[in-house]
Amino acid sequence: MNDAAEEFDVVVVGGGPAGATAAEDLARRGRSVLLLDRAGRIKPCGGAIPPRLIRDFDIPAHLLVARITGARMVAPSDRAVDMPIDPGGFVGMVDRDVFDPWLRERAREHGATLREGNFERLSRAADGTAVVEYRAGGSSGTVCVRARCVIGADGARSAVGRQAVKGAERVRCVFAYHEILRAPQGAAQGEAPGYDGARCDVYYQGRLSPDFYAWIFPHGDTVSVGTGSARKGFSLRGSVGALRAATGLAGMETIRREGAPLPLKPLKRWDNGRDVILAGDAAGVVAPASGEGIYYAMLCGRLVAEAAEAFCTTGDARALRQARARFMRAHGRVFWVLGVMQYFWYSSDKRRERFVAICQDKDVQRLTWQSYMNKELVRRDPLAHVRIFFKDLGHLLGLVRA
């Protein structure tokens, strides 16, 4: 390795929402940042972003391809329960093939160096400085850059994590797959009469996913139809085909197909105790049960950037630990609750049927949307929580008919 290689304060590997956010925040602070992203990377994602994300990260309206005003939960029996958002409220939808490049470009505009390349490995210079080796797009050679700090934001089963962070190689994942279609419009709308471009449909049916859920999420002129499962041998593509056939979407043009692993819970450790830290899916911050990741990825990227800034300022590697500690203080309880919910309610069609029945309850709907939109557990209405507790208990004990 050439010790005269180009040097940055921080090298961010991976240009998704977490990596791009970390790079932008560090560049705004005056740090020299290299944001390295591989070509052709689009993650399968429903694309939902809550109002808090739009506010906290200054997302412009033109990136929202749809505004969702409600959700429909579909049980194994095909019974559907609608969950409308309060009047005036909405969930934004983005297309990742547009959203992610926009985030990377914003980071570049604020001073980050943006390059296309495939991460190869981490090594060390003679003085112990971290060296990121990558293969530039269209090049057969390897480029080496030095970094005071390396952020691995390269997705679930992160290559940076596997090489540098103990335990990162053991992350458990759900594999997600979706197909982007032309949305039904005009005459085609009659082929899919149940389709609503302002509503997300979520299918809790064992035939479509034995341990997760399937979805139809509108994206304006397009629509995401997908599913996920951790069960080996389950046909994700077959499940999506069955869902398209059942909903009249089989004849819609398929624009692209994508698949990727989603981590099931945050890693126990995000840093190597020296100069490497993980962010986003690489750190495992995808919400159980819902699979929601964009907000948590961007928040994680921001917290990791703050930890990296503190490390670069003080040289104290203990500063890197603060990113995970702060994230778990804010959202650890939510992740635990969602994990328990997924383990219990998604385990059989009988339980899925009861879960969808619970979603009919107005208290459940109101508190669910409030928590989702604002990204915090709602504590202002204790009586509603008590009512939900006893209703849930009735469903668990079979005292309430599903």
Image: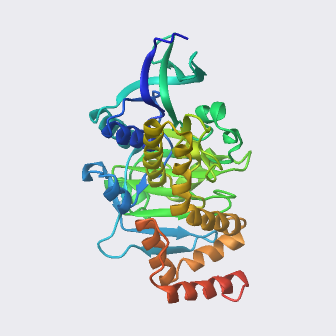
Q: Measuring 46% from the left and 85% from the top, which residue is drawn there?
A: 381
The N terminus lies in which quarter of the figure? top right
Q: Which color mode does the image show? A: rainbow
Nearer to the camera, 16 or 67: 16
Q: Measuring 50% from the left and 41% from the top, which residue is drawn there?
A: 43
**Residue 318 visible to the viewer:** yes
Q: Position of residue 116 (x, y in %)?
A: 42, 24
Asked if residue 328 lies left or right of residue 101, the reply is right
- Up the image or down, 120 lies above or below 160; here it is above
**Residue 291 visible to the viewer:** no
Q: Position of residue 65 (x, y in %)?
A: 32, 52
- Up the image or down, 394 lies above or below 57; here it is below
Q: Position of residue 182 (x, y in %)?
A: 39, 46
- Up the image or down, 330 lies above or below 224; here it is below
- Up the image or down, 314 lies above or below 130; here it is below
Q: Position of residue 294 (x, y in %)?
A: 45, 51
Q: Measuring 60% from the left and 21% from the top, which residue is drawn there?
A: 123
| Total marks in image | 0
The C terminus lies in which quarter of the figure? bottom right
Q: Measuring 72% from the left and 65% from the top, which residue is drawn there?
A: 347
In terms of image quadrants, where is residue 272? top right
Asked if residue 309 lies left or right of residue 319, the reply is left
In terms of image quadrants, where is residue 169? top right
